[in-house]
Image (cartoon, rainbow, N blue to C red):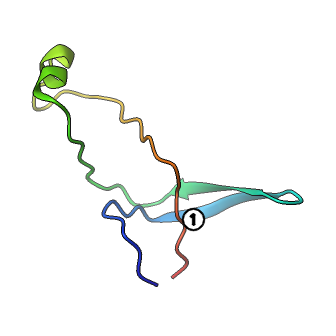
C-alpha cells in the first residue's frame, strides 16, 4: 500500500473499542523518531527556541493512518 506521509511512527495496537459505526484504536509507539515542524521565524523568536531546548510536541492532524505490514 502506498501512502503520502513522511513521518512514519512504528506502533503496536494496544486496545480496540468497537462501536456500531466507529471504533477507537489505541497504539503504543515502539520506535522513537525524529520529527520536524515548519514555523514562522516570528514564532521561533516568540518561543525563544534554541538548539538543545526540551519541548513538548503536540501533533495536530486530522487522521492517524494505521498501515499493517
Residue found 15% across the figure and 24% down from its top: 44
- Badge 1, how many Cα within 10 Å: few under 14, some, many 20+? few
13 sits left or right of 15 in the view: left
66 sits left or right of 43 in the view: right
Which of the 4 image quadrants contains residue 20? Answer: bottom right
28 or 40: nearer the eye? 40
Which of the 4 image quadrants contains residue 51? Answer: top left
Q: Is residue 11 above or below residue 37?
A: below
Residue found 35% across the figure and 55% down from its top: 32
34 or 62: nearer the eye? 62
Question: Where residue 19 sits: x, y (%)?
Answer: 86, 56
Residue found 20% across the figure and 34% down from its top: 39
Residue on which the image places disc 1: 12
Question: Where residue 64 sits: x, y (%)?
Answer: 52, 57
2 or 56: nearer the eye? 2
Q: Is residue 35 above or below residue 48?
A: below
Residue found 27% across the figure and 50% down from its top: 35
Question: Where residue 16 sits: x, y (%)?
Answer: 75, 59
Tell how many labels. 1
63 sits left or right of 43 in the view: right
Question: Where residue 58 sits: x, y (%)?
Answer: 41, 35
Q: Secondary structure at mark 1?
A: strand
Which of the 4 image quadrants contains residue 27? Answer: bottom right
Amino acid at each position: 500500500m502506498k501512502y503520502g506521509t513522511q513521518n512514519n511512527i512504528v506502533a503496536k495496537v494496544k486496545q480496540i473499542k468497537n462501536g456500531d459505526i466507529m471504533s477507537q484504536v489505541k497504539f503504543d509507539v515502539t520506535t522513537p523518531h525524529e520529527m520536524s515542524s515548519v514555523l514562522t521565524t516570528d514564532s521561533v523568536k516568540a518561543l525563544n527556541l534554541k538548539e538543545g531546548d526540551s519541548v513538548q510536541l503536540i501533533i495536530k492532524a486530522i487522521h492517524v493512518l494505521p498501515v499493517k505490514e
